[in-house]
Each structure stands twice: as C-alpha cells, then as structure tokens.
Image (cartoon, rainbow, N blue to C red):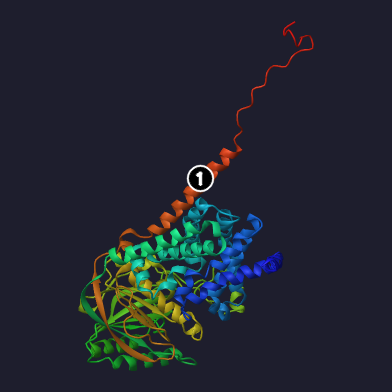
Amino acid sequence: MKSFGHWLTSPWRRSAMAALAGALPVFAFPAPSLWWFAYVALVPLIVLIRSAPTGKRAAYDGWCGGFGYLLAVHHWLLPSLHVFIFLIAVLLGALWAPWGWLVRRLLGGSPGPGRVLAALAVLPSGWLAIELVRSWQGLGGPWGMLGSSQWQVEPALRLASVGGVWLLSFLVVAVNVSVAVLVSVRESRMPAVAGLVATAAATSAAWVWSPRPDVDGRVRIAVVQPGVIDGVGSADKRFDREEQLTRRLAGQDVDLIVWGESSVGFDLGDRPDLARRIAALSRATGADILVNVDARRSDKPGIYKSSVLVGPDGPTGDRYDKMRLVPFGEYIPFRSALGWATSVGKAAGEDRRRGTEQVVMNVGHGLRVGPMVCFESAFPDMSRHLAEDGAEVLIAQSATSTFQHSWAPEQHASIAALRAAETGRPMVHATLTGVSAVYGPGGQRIGSWLGTGASSSELYDIPLADGVTPYVRYGDWPVHAALLVLAVWCASEGARAVRFRRPGPEPHVPPARTVRESPARPGR
C-alpha cells in the first residue's frame, strides 16, 4: 500500500488515476446497464481525492475525475467531434474541481462523526450543483446525469416521481460517500452506516407513500422505424419505406402513429405531394400521423426541425419547432470563432433555427400529446412543463443513426423511462434507426425495444393516467435544497474562519516601575 502511495506522488500518474476513477460510472449506464454499480462507482475517486496532500491537489483530482466522467459518458461523440470532445471534457471537467476540494475538506485525514455527517449532505449537494450547471443547453445538456442510470429500478422510478432524476443523483452520491467512509475511515463507520440506513429508509418511504398514477384509460400508439437508409436519394427512399410500414397498420384500430426525427426531409409546404401521401395514410389507418420535418421552411427563413401533425385532410396546423439544439451537431456556438469545427468533424454546416415555445397537440380520438425532439427528452423541465400543460402522452422523436454502433441509442432510449416516472405520463421514444421504446406512466417498459437492426412498425397498447406527481407539482426541489445546504455550509465555514481569526482580549499588564521607585516601598 505504501508503494502504491509513493507511486501516486507523481502528479501525472495521480491525474491519470483520477481520470480513470472518474470514468467508472459509465458502466452503470446502457449499454452495460449495470445499475447497481452506480452505488459504488464513485468510491475509488472519493478515496483518491481524500488522500490528496493539499486542497489544491484535491481540486486537481476532482477536475481530472470530471474529465474522465464526461469523456466516458460522451465517448460515442468522438467520431463526430474528434478533438472537440477532449476540449469539452477539459472545460466542463473544471466543474468538479470545487467538489474535489470539498471531498478533502470533509473527509481528509481522520474525519470525526460531525464531518462525516456533513459530507453525507454537502458532497451530494455539490454533485447536484455540478449537474445543474452542465444541464444548461449551451453546455451540452443533462446527458449522463448519475441518477438516470437507475432507469430500470422500480423503487428508483418511484423516487423520481417525488424529486425527479435530481433526487436519484443525490441518493446515489450519498451512498457512494457512505461506502467510501466505510472502506477508508474506520473510526467513523457509524455515521456512514447511518447514512446507508437513512437512504434505505427514504427509498422505502417513497415506495410506500409516493402516489401511484391512476390508470383511467388506454391508447394505441404505433411507432414506425424505417431503419438505416443511406446513399443518394436517402430522404425519398426513407419516406417510401415509412409509407410501406405505415400501411401495415391499417385496420388495427390505431389512435396515433409516430415517425422518428427527420423522417421527412422536405418542407411539406414545398412538397404538397408528400403531404397528400401522408394524409392518405392517415385515412387508411384511421389515425393522425406525427412526422418530423428537417428542412428549410417555405414560410420563413432558415432550417427547422419540427414535429408536424398530419390528419386525413393534410397538416392540421399543429406544429412544434425544436427549441433546444445540440451544440455542434445542430449549431456551432460562436461560429465566427469555432466555425473551423466543420473541417475536423461532423459539425453543422448551417445552424438550425430555434422554436419559441412548447406545444401540446390535440390528435385524433381526443388525445393530447406533448412532442419533443431528439435530446430534448434528456431535459426534465421540458417533460414536466408539458405535463403541467395537459399532455396525456409524452413523445420524443429521435434519430441516432450517426451513432448506430455505439452505446448512445440504448442510453437515449432509457432516458424516457425517467421522464415517464417523473411526470406520471407514458412516454413514446420513436427513432429512425433504433432504439425505439415505450414506457408506461410509472416508467415501466411496455413491450419490447425496437433495436438498431429493426425496420418495422410496432403497435403499443399504452395505459393513460391522471393525477399530478410531486415532481410535477413542486419541480426541482432537490436542487433548491442542495443549494441551500451548500449555502448553509459555506456560511458556517465562514463564521468559523472569522471566529478563529478574531483576536482575543489583550492580557492585563501591571504598569511598569520607574527607576526612582523602590521595590520595598513603591512610589518613593
């Protein structure tokens, strides 16, 4: 052990170990999907940081750990972004530097019970602050939030209905902190055990007391996934394939048919022939069809990605323009300075335009749906606002064909389970090339996934639910609580520092005697 500690005295070796330790949580996400691993995946990083010789070194360790985490959960972007993925990981990894300093401040040396108990609240709160900052769309959005690794765990989904993915992230980090203390700080094991017991108690309480969605009906929604279609004329070929797959749904009592992102490569105003063909499909199947148009608009300048509803008489007028665009993929931030990214990767040659508001659509059969496009499904606030606005079903239209042979399609499909559980609304994740998936109002999977090798149309019998989950009602309260915890801790640390620096009262010193005074008879 001493030889290993000596080996870590090299700053470069220590930084490499921190980056590797930070990358470990990636195995909790799909495709490996080892959900249980999330509860110990941060332990090596925490143990490494707490051994840092100085607070500055602990901050560096946190930075390197954040770099490793971001690079791991976004590794599938490497073919598209090339060197930019490393630059992004370095820049955003800096968010973990204060967290690394906090780890050493609270757990370094031989922490007593008080510091350990503080760590169980402050360190998960610090992690949530990191996730809050990097969830900003301009920084890439909330892909790879630690709590989203729990998408297939029923108790975790119940917790998501109470506090969203934020609450799951908090509890996962708290468990990691407890385990790290158990394995590295023998004298403070009791507070660590108390943290584990408290986490288990909170999970059990949510299981018992959190409201369950009340199922009050069912709806039949079909997903059309054409599969990979490349080469010259791919937009026309894809449309033909989607048309063939949709015709198979005739006579199956469908309420809504959903096509994936960029399923129509032409503006329907410029191609009325395509609009007529989709309307004919609507008449044949007896259902409205939600398509996604990725094209230059005929009625305003610029390229938009838009969810467009088409009924038996043509486009109904319901349209949602994508609001949150993928940095570099759909627009280049500061294009005047970073436009050269198009020469080294698959960055957007022209920026897409943004929509201005979310839309709830009234489709056939009295059903109200809330569409999102692509990675918008990763943003908890978007699905929550749609539920507040009356959406009965959430829909995400996506296309992960660029990342077909990576972990991205499965991870993207899993995110929809969290959005369904948070809102108490079923969610349909429809893609061009897989993975397509459907989840019930509790986040449970309905039917089977359409994998990346599938080209088919699938019909899902989906339960509808009413009522409002605590997360929809109260919003991101775990984030607000975490920020409050950090503020209180900072205030207490500041007060402690002031108390230590404040000079005490000067000691009383008797007046000095002059040379004329006699020791035997003072004053003479």
Quadrant of residue 157 within the rendered picture = bottom left
Q: Inspect the image, locate mark 1, and give the three-letter code of the amino acid beneath it.
A: Ser
Q: How many marks?
A: 1
Quarter of the picture holding the N terminus:
bottom right
- Relative height, residue 493 to residue 231 (above, below): above
Residue on which disc 1 sits: 492
Looking at the picture, how far across and down is residue 61, in whole percent?
62, 63
Task: Rate crowding at label 1 as few (under 14), some (14 to 19) or many (20 or more) other CA atoms within 10 Å.
Answer: few
The one of 59 and 307 positioned closer to us in this rendering: 59
Left or right of residue 44, residue 125 in this image:
left
The x and y percentages for residue 237 are: 42, 93
> Going by the image, does 216 lie left or right of 326?
left
Give the structural element (helix, strand or loop) at label 1.
Answer: helix
Residue 8 appears in view: yes
451 versus 384 height, above or below: below
Quadrant (top left, top right, bottom left, bottom right) of the C terminus = top right
Residue 143 in view of the camera:
no
Residue furthest out toward the right: 515
Q: Position of residue 169 (x, y in %)?
A: 44, 65
Q: Nearer the viewer, residue 119 or 170?
A: 119
The percent coordinates of residue 231 (x first, y second) are: 50, 92
The quarter holding residue 508 reads top right
